[in-house]
Amino acid sequence: MQKARQGERAFEKMEKISAELFVVTYGSLVMQLLEDSEGKVEEVNNELYSIGYKIGVRLIDEYLAKSQTQCRTFRDTAEAIAKVGFKMFLGVTADVRNWAEDGSSYSLIIDDNPLTMFADLPDNLNNLWYSNSLCGVIAGALEMVLWKCKVQFHKDQLRGHDCTEIRVSLVEQLKEEFQQEDD
Amino acid sequence: MPSYTPPSVVAISIIGRHGSPIFLDLFEELDEEESLWLQCSLASSLDPIEDKVKQAKGDNRYLGFVFPSGDCRVYATTSNTLVKLLAVLKGEPRDADVRNLLRLTHEAYSAQVCNPFYEYSTPITSQKFRNGIRKIVADTKLKPA
């Protein structure tokens, strides 16, 4: 509950743009990638992830500045992403579910993915993860705060699944490295 | 005493620039002859539509009744992108209801155009769009004028 309120407050501080413009821009980006890769869908999935990753490593600083949340454990990061991060940047919240027994992975369930507002996936592109850049953003952001994770789509309503689900799995917790000066 | 039938939707059609067919959905069972008649009526409506468009002012133009076709009437609205949205209706519905029907159809078409996978000016094959139009027609109550 507290994270949800933090999310609302952070959302209010953010500058807003037209959702339609953003969504149509994202759609054009996906189409251009498909054209450039000459229909190699796996390549496009990877490119979208890459693009998202580069966004995530930058976005995390703004997130920390505007939201002022503290994440001490991996568990904390889940709620922070779902209720604060998603709210701040996409205007919607996600649910955290299906925690693994050892607490090393969880699912983010998105009810209303704004990126897919107008999109309707044609049958021949059924192995495209349209919003894969979201996975990249989450992975990039988490890595900057020393949680190295594997983030991937499990289900997408655009593909006809019953929900949109991103699985986040902890690979390792990174340690801060200090460069040793040679004497 | 003749039984009263309320006005109903026979077909919704979208025609693009240069008369290219974008979308057609039928809401009544038509045999081959009636189906051909419908296609002819839609094609024949294009000329009176052009005439009305030249006389109208402003960009998004509701043209109203444009062409009679047997016991049906063709109503149309156009947009500044030269796309024509037509509704073939039986009976004489209220103007406000027809305006509403065509407005909702136009909104559905605008959303479809924003689908990045849809190539502009090609026929719309999306089942999602078809379901959307069916819902609009199902929810529209046409009252007689």
Image: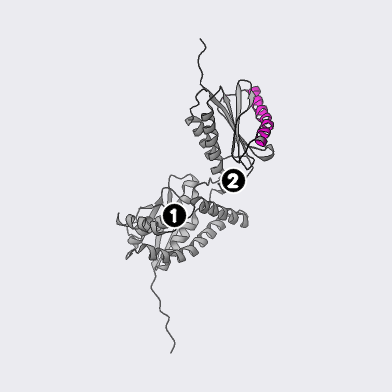
Chain under disc 1: A
Q: Residue A124 in the image: state x and y as whole percent.
A: 58, 47
Cα–Cα gap, marks 2 and 1:
24 Å
Q: Residue A111 in the image: state x and y as whole percent.
A: 41, 48
Judging by the rendered image, the residue that carries numbered circle 2 is B118
Q: Specify the amino acid type for callout 1.
A: Leu
Q: Residue furthest bottom?
A: A183
Disc 2 versus disc 1: nearer the observer: 1
Image position of B56 (left or right of A47): right
Q: What residue is drawn where x is 40% and y is 63%? A: A63
Q: Is residue B45 magenta?
A: yes
Q: Which residues are magenta?
A: B28-54
Main structural element of the magenta stretch: helix, strand or loop? helix
Judging by the rendered image, the residue that carries numbered circle 1 is A90
Image marks 2 and 1: residues in contact by CB distance under 8 Å: no
Q: What residue is drawn where x is 66% and y is 27%? A: B41
In front: A19, or B129? Answer: A19
Image position of B48 (left or right of A111): right
Q: Quadrant of the C terminus of chain A?
A: bottom left
Quarter of the image where one finds residue B18? top right
Neighbourhood count class around disc 1 (C-alpha, 10 Å): few under 14, some 14–19, many 20 upward: some
Quarter of the image where one finds residue B59? top right
